[in-house]
Amino acid sequence: MASTDKPAPEPEKAAPPPDAPPAPEPEKAVPPPGAPAPPPDYLVVADVVLRVLLFAAALTAVVVMVSAKQTVFVPLTSSSPFLLVPLKAKFRHSPAFVYFVAALSVAGLYSIITIAISFLALLKPSSSTKLLAHFVIFDVLILGIVAAATGAAAAVAYIGLKGNSHVGWTKVCNVYDKFCRHIAGSISVSLFASIVLVLLVILSAYSLSKKIPK
């Protein structure tokens, strides 16, 4: 007698699931209204403050140096003390002082440009890393220019103050007292600008090192 059992049907193959749609990108968290703003980068704030000080120092040094001028009346000869001739002293009579004014003017213009760039870095922190790398290079360059100008002007001012008996250079600050006071004040402010530039180089290098992944 033939068996009436029917063979069991083969299990149906499961259809492959359709391609899942790509997961949506997570939305950036938007701070709720009234939430406090993220704290500013205090290193960038310090950079802006130092660059404002650099501009003020460079401008002051240039203005004081340019205004350094004095006219004195000296006897024409020792035998005629009443016959006086005017002698003028101006900053442009010395190449060192002219270079000083040019160098500090460049530093002042540079500080204006970098103040604007630092404000941009303060508003957009993502762009600060590339800016810091450029700041380190140009800050060192401007520091060298300002330091060289300060040293050259200070050397000429020292000769005017003390003279040099070995080569017969007489001192003149006992005659041009007002002129020498202007020169001394301008050089002192320029020295302060050099210190500010040193601090800017250190700050930029430190800020850049913090952004390097470890």
Image (cartoon, rainbow, N blue to C red):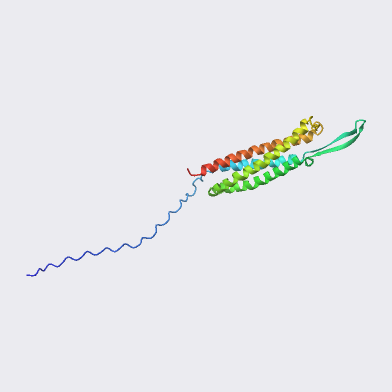
How many numbered tags mark residues here?
0
31 shown above or below 186: below
The quarter holding residue 45 reads top right
**Residue 1 image position (x, y, % from top left):** 6, 70
Residue at 63% across, 40% down = 197
Q: Find the residue positioned furthest to the left.
A: 1
Q: Quadrant of residue 6?
A: bottom left
Q: Residue at x 77, y 30 (%)?
A: 162
x, y percent for residue 53: 65, 40
Whether residue 136 is visible to the viewer of this picture, yes or no, is yes
In the picture provided, is 60 more to the left or to the right than 176? left
The residue sitting at the front extreme is 166
- Residue 208 placed where, x, y %? 54, 43
Relative depth, front residue between 213 and 84: 213
- Say which residue appears at 69% left-offset and 39% top-offset: 148
Give left or right: position of 213 versus 57.
left
Q: Which residue is rendered at x = 64% and y = 42% of the image?
A: 52
